[in-house]
Every structure is written in structure tokens, then in C-alpha cells.
Amino acid sequence: MKMTRYLGACGLAALLAACGVGASGGGAGGGLPLAGLNAGPQAQAAAAPDAAAEPASAQFARSKAALPGADPRSGTYRVYAANGTQQQLALDFDAGSYTMTDNLGAAESGTFAEDITEPGTYVFASSRITTAANTSRFRVTTDTVVGAFPFQTAYSSPAVYAPQPFVAARDFVTTAAALDGTYNRFSVTRSPGNAQDSLILAMRLSGSGTVLELCNSAVIYRIDLCPTASKLTYAVTPGTDSAWVATNVANGDVASFRVARIGGQNVYLAGGANTAPAMQFMRIGLPESTNWPTTRGVGGATTGSWGSNLIDTANSVRTSTAPDGTYGSLTMPVSGTLPLQPDGIRGVNLSGSSKYFAMQGGALSVLVGARNPNTQGYLQLNLIDTGAAPDARNGRYKVYASNGTRQSLGLNLDTKRYEMTDETGTVAAGSFAEDVAEPGSFVFDSSRITSPVNTARFRLATDTVVGSFPFALAHVTPVSYDVRPFVASRALVKAQASLDGTYNRLGINLTATTADSTIAQFQVANGGTVLYLCNDSGVYSIGNCPAASVRTYTVSAGASVDTWQIVNVANPSDIGSFAIARIGGENVYLSAGIVSSTPTMSLFRIGLPERAAWPTVTARGGATNGGWGSTAIGASTYAQTRVLPDGTAGMLNASLASLGAAGPLNMRLVTFPNATIQFTSQSSKMFAMVGSRNPATAGALEIGLID
């Protein structure tokens, strides 16, 4: 085991250092030394196990990598993890398997697979992952892996696991003279009781790799401008296994580090545990540079998120998915260079309450939280992607399907691949292609489709997919598939107060042999805590609903961060779950699943916001009869051009009429020439229509995305 001391500041130094921007013009974030640091006991670094102690799977990956024809990325890498440990990662790309061996020799093994929505990103499968979204993944460049893994949270007992970023390398500098250079070093520390801190400073290796100097100050200085009292000097000598040992010339403190070659540049790496005071730390240093290019990095953060970070001289834009499935984008301003601060360190959002610092170079882009309560201890590690920027619509969407199920849709618009994953984990994957006859519509290719015409397709809006897919028919045994419409979103409301509004709800109930319709208006009020539903044989606005027909439900947080549960105040067995998607700048209500009181019945609901306007629009989408078409909706007309799975094509026309003074404003009665009746509503981007509750139309549903 390597012997090390904590070099620079630690968590307690936050009591001594300023937060935010220093008065001298440098950004706060450098460290201050602790009194009596040299008096504490020597600490052992949390080092990766020696090769002789490798699990058999890791030894196999190491030996297999040397075989002719083997994937050159396979092999063993030394891991520096943000939980403050050094570990060992063995990858076998031919078998799609891995072994992560921690500093105590405990191994976690499993498989990995490429994410079709983000080529070049591989997803770890692990029993440690229990969150809604698996953000434990990695990317690879020459001799380097950058990713996130469900490491044990520092000092947790019993062990708690959470995705944390890491850098893993297998090409390290072993020639002392090659160490020389000026570096910008970011550090994070973890202490008992969930305390954490950040450290930002400049350092220099010189004298053909024999001298290490660092600026241990509350202000971030260039190493040449570091006050004499803040400069710490270490003598550097070779250690073992590519490590280097730095000894403080003033007090004898000892530290161990390595320098990896990543992206053609030196990268300083250190990690381990200190015993007095107790803490675990990770440090990463990139070469100082006046060059600040626009880059797009992909990687993980200590919050557990995984995503991309696009950074230039003006902004840092983080687009990511959190472990709870939350997808979002955050834009923060990037500051310019400062007179005292290294050119290679830029402030991010320094005028805001959550402040960060960024550095980049070679293949890496790194962000660390400033030393203030909102951000200290935050670390984001990204591998720079030099390829073309991917389509912003790529990603995973939560599906509400009209067969009464909730599923997940993964899309890659660049490679034209998709994955539809149902509630049991069954994946239907394939390709799709744009319909040249209808630009903006894409056709799913699926072995489930056996009809003469493929009507399974989709269209996209911001964070939204609307289409039709060959889903399993509700409750039908053996399984049978038919094309049915769906709405998918990755912008679901998570703030309860934002649920408020009045909605026109159109829905269907399904059993193995029957289908029915439901048409009603409801209101969510009181900061999203109560729902009033007009449950009447007539279709009334909630304000005109007969008092005896108003059902009152409480609304509370659901099973996930973006679902909500309702419970009937008068009948607690009447419960349900719903989500609110943001589509076209408006709330859209969605619900799908098995009816709690009737396990042999499933439901689908879509609710569009109440409003007085009824503009003329064109919507394109699918219907429960398997058809796909284009529908023109006017003030009093409905005209649809469609094609059915059997190849039947044609046009349907109908007249529209309001529901009168007592009915919802944003709902129309649709009367077809054969006297059948349906009900329709629209929002800024969505159109929906459901059949009336008579045998000819009950259970009929049409959903379209408005041009």
C-alpha cells in the first residue's frame, strides 16, 4: 500500500477560506493548510489492489487484451474515483463484461452494453443500481476510461452505493523529466457525516520532475504570482507501480500521485484516504494553457447525473439525466480570465448562488464546485467528444401508450435506431426511416408488423414524441400486437404547484374483449393538492358540473418524481396515477395503467388545457384502428386523410359544434355523416379525439401532433 499525507487543505479549511470571488480579483477556492498537519499519523492511500490479488475475471480480461484480434480497449485500468478511492477496472469489450475491484479487494462484476441513444457510451449493469434511470456508464479513448460507477458512498455504514464519476488510465509517466509542467488542480474531499469540500489551485512540477510547488491559498493564484507564505514545496522521487512520492521540504509530509497520459497530455491524478482528520479525496490536474476552445464533453457528476457539457468562452450548458430520470438542461455564464488566476481556469456562474470553476485540456473537461455551501464537493468529469454534435432530440422518453401501458422509448435520430421497452423490461428494437411522402414523420421498422401497410410512425416536438407503435393488445392471451397511438415525453412536471389547471380529459378503458370511452373535465387546484372531476353522463365544464357529480381527490407525490397519485376523498379505493407533460409550453395530462379496482381492465387518458381559443390547425398522428393520417381542424370542420394497416386509404369529413354554455370551451362535438359522434380537444401542439360511449365508437381514439 502507498503511504500518503493529505496535501494542501481539507474540509476544515472551509472555516478559514473565503467563499465566492476573492477581494484581490482571484476566485476563491484555494486551500489553507491545517495547523499541525505534519503531527498527524501517516495515512494509507486507498490504492487499487496489486495485480497478484486480481479476481480471475480481471486477470482474464488483462490476458485476453493481449490476444491477437482482441478489442484493444479491453484490459485493466487504474481507477481514480470521486468517492476518494483508487480501484481497478477490468473491461472485456468482446464479451461485454467488466469487473470493478475496490481498494479493499472486493469485486463487483457484470455486463455492459452500448446506449443506442448515445453511441460511444456504455452502460454498466449492476445490482447496486436501483434508481429509475441508470446513470452508471462510461466512454473510452486511447488507454483511458471516463465514466460513472455505483461506488460506495464515502464512510457509509452499512454501505450505500451511488453513481460517482471516475477517470481510469493505464498509460502513466515513468520518466521524471516528463513530469515537468504547470498544472491546474481540482480536488474534492469526503468526510464522515457527509461533509464535503472543494479545492482549486495551481501547481508546478519542475527540475526534471524533482520539485513540486503548489499555491495553497484561499485565492486562486497563478503559480508564478503565488504569495511566498502560500507556496508549498515538495521534493519528488520515484515510487512504485508508476507512482511518484512528494515530500514536503518544510515538514516532511508525504504524498503520492501519478501522471497519466490522456489525449496526448499529462494529467495529474491522486486519490486516497487521510486519517487525521479523516477524509477521502480525489485530485485531478490538467496542464495550464491560454487556449480555451469550444468543447463538448460527456460524463458524470457527483450528483449522479450523466450527460453532456458544452462549454465555450461565454456559457457552460449541461444537458443531463439524473438517477431519478429527470432530464434537463442548465446554462450558466463563463467568466473570462482574471489577472491573478491561471488562464486555464474559468469561473462558471460566479455571480450566482451556485458557483463553479472549469478547466479543460486534451481529452478532458472538468468542473468543480466553488467553496460555498451550494456547490463545494461537486465534481463533473467529461471525456471530450470531437465528433459531430448529436441530434438534440436523441435520448429516452417516457411513453404513455393507448394500450394502457407506460413504456420507455429510446431514439437516436443520427443512427435511426430505436428501443421500446415495456413495463416488464421486454425490448423491441429496430430501425426507423423518414417518410419521404410526409417530411417530419418517421416509420418504425418492426417484426411485429405483418399488415400490408406499415402505419407505425412518429413525429417530434421539443422533448416530445407522438406516434403509433405495435404494442401488445391489453389483456389478450396469447400476446397479439396492433398499432396504437402513444405520447412520450422527457419534460414531465415535478413541482406539485405547477400541476394546477383545468383540463379536458379524453380516455378509453380496455379489457381483452371490450373498449369504452370517457369524456370529462377536471381541475387541479390549491397548489396541486386537490383534483375536482366532473363525473357525469353529460359533458360539463367543472364550473357547471352538478354538485352531486363532482368527485374530489387528494393529490400527492407518486411512485416516481414525475408521477402523481390521486385518492377519492369519499371512496379511498378509487385511486389513480398521472403525469403532466410540458408540450408546446402547456401542461398536458397523461395517464395509463391497470385500473386498481378492476385488474382485468387498463386505461389511457389524455387531458388538454381548457382555453377559449379554437384555431385552425393541421395535426398528424395515429388512431386505435391502426390508421395514420393528417387531420385538418377548422372552426366547424374536421377533414382527415388517412391510410389503414390493410391499405385502405381515403378521407373522412365531419362537422364540429360547441358543447354549449354548460360545456367545456376547448371541446367540440364531432358528428360524422353516418351520425356517429366523437369528442375532440386541442392544445398548442396536441390534438385528441375520442368516440362517444355507444357501441359504434366507444374506445376509438385519435392522437395527433399539430404542425
Image (cartoon, grey):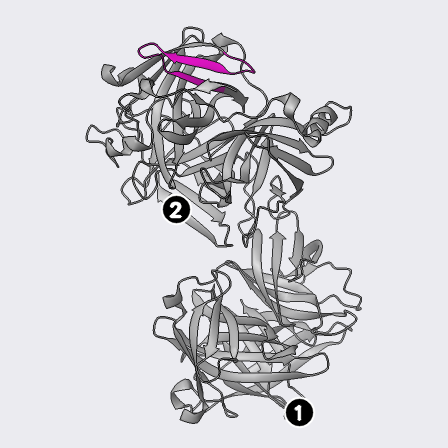
Location of mark 2 (residue): 331
Sequence-wise first label, 1 or 2: 2
- Asked if the stretch drawn in magenta spans residue 248, the answer is yes
- What residue lies at 29% left-to-right and 16% top-to-bottom? 231
Q: Position of residue 227 (x, y in %)?
A: 24, 17
Q: Is residue 532 in view? A: yes
Q: Nearer the viewer, residue 115 or 651?
A: 115
- Asked if the stretch drawn in magenta spans residue 58, the answer is no
Instruction: Please tell me in which quadrant of the rendered image residue 386 appears.
Output: top right
Relative side of 189 to 481, left or right: left
Q: Position of residue 462 (x, y in %)?
A: 50, 58
- What residue lies at 61% left-to-right and 48% top-to-bottom? 117
Q: Amino acid at mark 1?
A: Asn
- What residue lies at 77% left-to-right and 63% top-to-bottom? 448
Q: Is residue 264 in view? A: no
How dense is the environment of label 2, judged by Cα within 10 Å: few (below 14), some, or many (20 and up)? some
**Circle 1: element type:** loop
Q: Position of residue 573 (x, y in %)?
A: 52, 80
Instruction: Please tell me in which quadrant of the rendered image residue 203 appears.
Output: top left
Q: Which residues are magenta?
A: 239-258
**Circle 2: element type:** strand
Q: Nearer the viewer, residue 425 or 456?
A: 425
Query: Which of the two marks, 1 or 2, is nearer to us in this view?
Result: 2
Location of mark 1 (residue): 674
- What residue lies at 28% left-to-right and 28% top-to-bottom? 338
